[in-house]
Image (cartoon, rainbow, N blue to C red):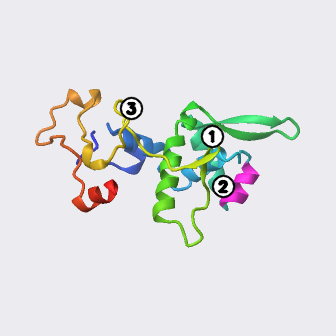
Amino acid sequence: MSCQGSRVRWNEINTVECSIARALSVVGDRWTMMIVRDVFLGIRRFDAMQQDLGLTPHRLSHRLGKLVRDGILVRVEYEKRPRRFEYRLTEAGIDLFPLIVVLNTWGDRWMAGRAGVPIELVHRKCGRAIKPALTCPSCKEKMVPREMSLRPGPALKHRGLPGKTFQAVQVPAHFAQHQRG
């Protein structure tokens, strides 16, 4: 299966030959990224997460179990009697940091209320609040949708996708102008 044109049930999304679909099979639930956000913020214990998120114990337990099974979190015992655990990010979980940052940046721009943004991202080394930007690792220029294109990667090169061609991302002109300003 590819990302284009096939009918897929949500519980089969991890079988689609598309990195976005596969990633969404792990983090696509609306509560999952909130849990990951909490762990990044240092909220690692079940009771503290439940209080912060307002989730029922059953729902939180289910989501945490899935994140552990999917290799995003690991349970670490912090008390022997009674046995208690906290949740820590794995390497795969830490790699979600850019996604958290991008979601936060989008939310700050498009969803912040009159009072302003709820949190600021501060670079510890220099102590300054930052607004992250995607840049090309080769030329260091800011990446904008109008200047990006897609092409088949190794997983799709072997397929003859009849009638399917990969072209530059088509972005409305008014958006491209807004990005330059």
Residue 144: percent from left, percent from top: 32, 47
Whichever of callouts 1 and 3 sits on the residue coming sooner in the sequence is 1
Q: Residue at x 15, y 40 (%)?
A: 165
Q: Main secondary structure of the magenta part?
A: helix
Whichever of callouts 3 and 2 sits on the residue coming sooner in the sequence is 2
Relative to 140, residue 119 above or below = below
Left or right for 167, reference 142: left
Give the distance between the C-alpha atoms of the residues marked 1 and 3, in whole angstroms: 22 Å
Residue under label 2: 58
Whichever of callouts 2 and 1 sits on the residue coming sooner in the sequence is 2
Return the mark for residue 126: 1
Q: Residue at x 34, y 43 (%)?
A: 143
- Magenta stretch: give its range: 46-53
Q: Residue at x 32, y 36 (%)?
A: 17
Give the distance between the C-alpha atoms of the residues marked 3 and 2, in whole angstroms: 43 Å
SS for tag 1? loop
| Mark 1: amino acid | Cys
